[in-house]
């Protein structure tokens, strides 16, 4: 772990997921802002360890992922350090993140074999999802776009097409709030989706579907196949407002018996679908899980949840977007 600690004293301020974020290094994709003390605050220290911490100090394993590397090592481990003073999230490639007990400061550290860009790919995905959840925010593994003054959210299992659908909406002129993580905020009984960061991560097959070539967009990392669609220009816009959720669409395999492309589902089915598509599910204790269930129960009671039968091979992605728009207009 020979990574030198940065000494740059400049501080960069951003907003994302309803948080005010400061960083000692630039974080591409986040929305820059002037210092705003009115938002919940998180300080990020890149290329650093907590002051005075010993990497060989007392640790207690809290979580190990079931997914193993070819060497048989857990791909992700989470530890309590110094009797819970810090939480250590460590990946098998030795990139690690430290959080203090209040979840207000986050340190990122990586070996010489890795890079800042690699650490940021973790930070803007699973680490931010875990941080938000530990701070009490319920996050869906989803994407969200805005239509008018409301947001629509796409959820579903990995590979269901959440990012692809959001990118297709973006190409039709609809701003994107978030990709991969949709943080929820409940304001006076109304659920809002919070804007995240200015990019969509797409697999090459999705890039080819949308742009005609898998190489039409740049790679996020040299050794990672995913491509980056940057948001914020005239053609593909980023939505900076937090917006009330108008509907949630569940993407997945087509239902052969259904004649409808979009169909309503029961609140019970909607509830179980959302439960299986939240962040940090395996890491929560009983109290946190109960609180999450209560939030999701209120969500499905107040927001329409529909199942999208994609009819793969029949409807193209642009046609599917049109169908969803028509259904959303009918719900309104």
Image: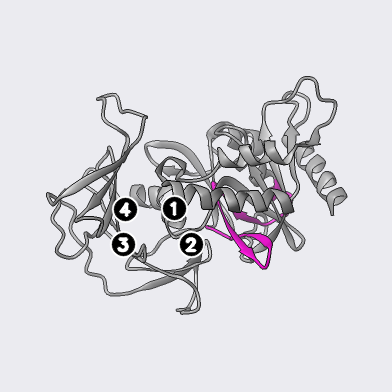
Residue at 35%, 47% in the rendered image: 118
1 or 4: tag closer to the N-terminus: 4
**Residue pushed farthest top?**
256
Proximity of marks 1 and 2: CB atoms separated by less than 8 Å? yes
Q: Residue 136 or 211: which is nearer the viewer? A: 136
Give the label on residue 124, or none: 1
Decide which of 289, 256 is in the foreground and name it: 289
Quarter of the image with the C terminus is: bottom right
Q: Give the residue at mark 2.
A: 30
Q: Is 323 located above or below residue 230 in the figure?
A: above
CA–CA distance in space, label 1 to label 3: 20 Å
Q: Observer-nearest residue: 244 or 199?
A: 244
Q: Earlier in the sequence, mark 1 or mark 3?
A: 3
Residue at 61%, 49% in the rendered image? 296
Give the residue number, with chain letter if any, for mark 3. Answer: 101
User: Is 314 left, or right, of 188 in this rendering?
Assistant: right
Mark 3 / mark 2, whichever is N-terminal:
2
Element marked by disc 4 = helix
Quarter of the view holding residue 194: bottom right
Residue 320: percent from the left, percent from the top?
Answer: 77, 37
Asked if the residues shown at circle 3 and circle 2 are in contact, with their CB atoms under 8 angstroms apart, the answer is no
Q: Local crowd at mark 2 within 10 Å, few (<14), some, or many (≥20)?
A: some
Q: CA distance from mark 1 to mark 4?
A: 12 Å
Q: CA distance from mark 4 to mark 3?
A: 24 Å
- Residue on which disc 4 sits: 116
Task: Judge whether residue 182 is colored magenta.
Answer: yes
């Amino acid at each position: 772990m020979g990574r030198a600690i940065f000494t740059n004293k400049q501080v960069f301020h951003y907003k994302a997921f309803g948080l005010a974020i400061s960083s000692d290094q630039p974080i591409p994709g986040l929305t820059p802002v002037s210092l705003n003390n009115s938002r919940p605050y998180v300080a990020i220290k890149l290329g650093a360890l907590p002051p005075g911490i010993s990497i060989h100090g007392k640790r207690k394993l809290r979580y190990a992922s079931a997914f193993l590397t070819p060497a048989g090592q857990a791909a992700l481990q989470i530890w309590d350090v110094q009797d819970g003073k810090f939480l250590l999230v460590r990946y098998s490639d030795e990139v690690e993140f430290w959080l203090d007990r209040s979840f207000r400061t986050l340190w990122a550290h990586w070996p010489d074999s890795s890079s800042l860009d690699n650490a940021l790919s973790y930070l803007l995905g699973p680490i931010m999802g875990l941080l938000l959840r530990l701070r009490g925010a319920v996050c869906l593994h989803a994407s969200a776009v805005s239509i008018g003054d409301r947001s629509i959210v796409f959820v579903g299992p990995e590979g269901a097409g959440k990012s692809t659908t959001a990118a297709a909406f973006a190409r039709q002129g609809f701003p994107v709030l978030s990709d991969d993580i949709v943080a929820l905020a409940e304001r006076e009984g109304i659920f809002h989706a919070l804007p995240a960061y200015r990019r969509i991560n797409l697999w090459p097959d999705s890039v080819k579907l949308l742009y005609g070539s898998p190489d039409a967009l740049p790679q996020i990392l040299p050794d990672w196949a995913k491509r980056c669609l940057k948001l914020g220009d005239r053609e593909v816009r980023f939505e900076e407002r937090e917006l009330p959720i108008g509907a949630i669409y569940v993407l997945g395999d087509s239902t052969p018996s259904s004649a409808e492309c979009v169909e309503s589902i029961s609140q019970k089915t909607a509830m179980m679908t959302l439960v299986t598509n939240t962040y940090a599910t395996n890491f929560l204790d009983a109290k946190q899980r109960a609180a999450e269930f209560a939030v999701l129960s209120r969500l499905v009671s107040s927001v329409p949840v529909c199942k999208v039968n994609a009819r793969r091979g029949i409807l193209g992605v642009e046609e599917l977007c049109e169908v969803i728009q028509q259904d959303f207009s009918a719900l309104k």
